Amino acid sequence: METTDDLPQGKETKLFDPQNCAAGSGAEVLDASVVRHGDRWWMYLAGQASGQGATQLFSASLDPGVPLSALGWNLTQTESGELAPLAGQEVSRPWDGNGGRHCPSYVKGWDPKKCEWVERIYYAGAAENLWGPYTIGFLEWNGEAWIDQPAPAFAASEEWEHGSVYEPNLIYHGGKWKMWYVAGSNHENYLVHGYAESDDGITGWSSHAVFAPPEMKMFDFCIRERAGSFDAIFARVWVGEGNAPADTGLWWCRADTPSGVFFDWSRPIQIMTAEDRGWHSGPWKPSLQFDEQNTSRAFVFFDGLYRTSSTGPFPFAFTLGCLEVDLPVIAVNADHNQVLISANKEEIT
């Protein structure tokens, strides 16, 4: 793996901070999934409107027609000024009720049963406890609203998953709903990254395969298509004691196809470390999108954490930020041991 020395330094912007109403509404929202939906850019989020209780899914958006930016996001609120939940829980409450909804991931794909394209927001739901165990399900867009589902679409089935699956990241490609996800538990200091795929994104999932081993501490793997290939940003986290190692942070890699085998991707390059910036350290949950006019310009939305002056049991606040950085095109040679890097598609050896 390589370091940030190989890339230009990016610009970091704080979007939402519960301790600073100038940076957001004062609510704690994070876990962004950023997509173009309808006439504008949307950000689907998880959080707690009142700072306690089960987490819910919310949204923020840019004004219609405004290009993608780190600034200008407006949280969706009710007429009384409270955060508006993205969907009700009339039918999903048995599996996502008391523990809430976490880590949303938007995806559009083909439903072979309905014979139509559908839009979904997958998320991890917990039936009883905020800390899991989790299963993965989705909301589906009916043309007017996001609709909850009566049962999860994906659950742990392998011994190495330790009974809990969460942090889904999905794309639809080659007739398959492809999902990368985390299994295990932060409290156990055991995180393993898995991969599975399905024809309809609900049933018939392939065998759950290990994508990245627990010692790598991979927490997310967010993929976007660009220039006929695929870019991915992933987080490496540190949930143990002591200082975080140097490889904690955000990493970038690229592949010709969105493979469920990690070694099919180019050698990862670190684009953000765990350095304490005051309002965040040890970033995670990246959501990648590219500038519509300049496809080398990437917007990487991410979660952060900082210590507060509170004397309570959890003296920390969660923040949401954005890294703007130029990511050149990478071509991977046949043995996957080297990469060719260029911002203008001219190969550099």
Image: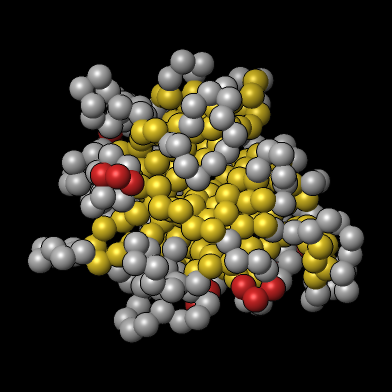
Please tell me which residue lies in front, 253 or 109.
Answer: 253
Q: Quadrant of the N terminus?
A: bottom right
Relative height, residue 125 to residue 323 (above, below): above
Relative to 147, is 117 on the left or the right?
right
Q: Quadrant of residue 32?
A: top left
Residue 200 appears in view: yes
Q: Residue at x 65, y 29 (%)?
A: 110
Residue 126 appears in view: no
Q: Quadrant of the C terminus?
A: bottom right
Please tell me which residue lies in front, 174 or 49.
Answer: 49
Looking at the picture, how far across and down is residue 79, in whole percent?
25, 19
Relative to 222, is 6 on the left or the right?
right
Looking at the picture, how far across and down is residue 339, in whole percent?
80, 70
Relative height, residue 11 to residue 154 (above, below): below
Residue at the top extreme of this rendering: 144
Q: Quadrant of residue 262?
A: bottom right
Residue at the left extreme of this rendering: 311
Q: Residue at x 86, y 56 (%)?
A: 345
The count of marks equals 0
Relative height, residue 10 to residue 196 (above, below): below
Please tell me which residue lies in front, 264 or 252.
Answer: 252
Looking at the picture, how far across and down is residue 249, in whole percent?
50, 69
Looking at the picture, how far across and down is residue 130, in whole percent?
25, 51
Q: Residue at x 45, y 60 (%)?
A: 284
Residue at the front extreme of this rendering: 22
Please tell me which residue lies in front, 9 or 18.
Answer: 9
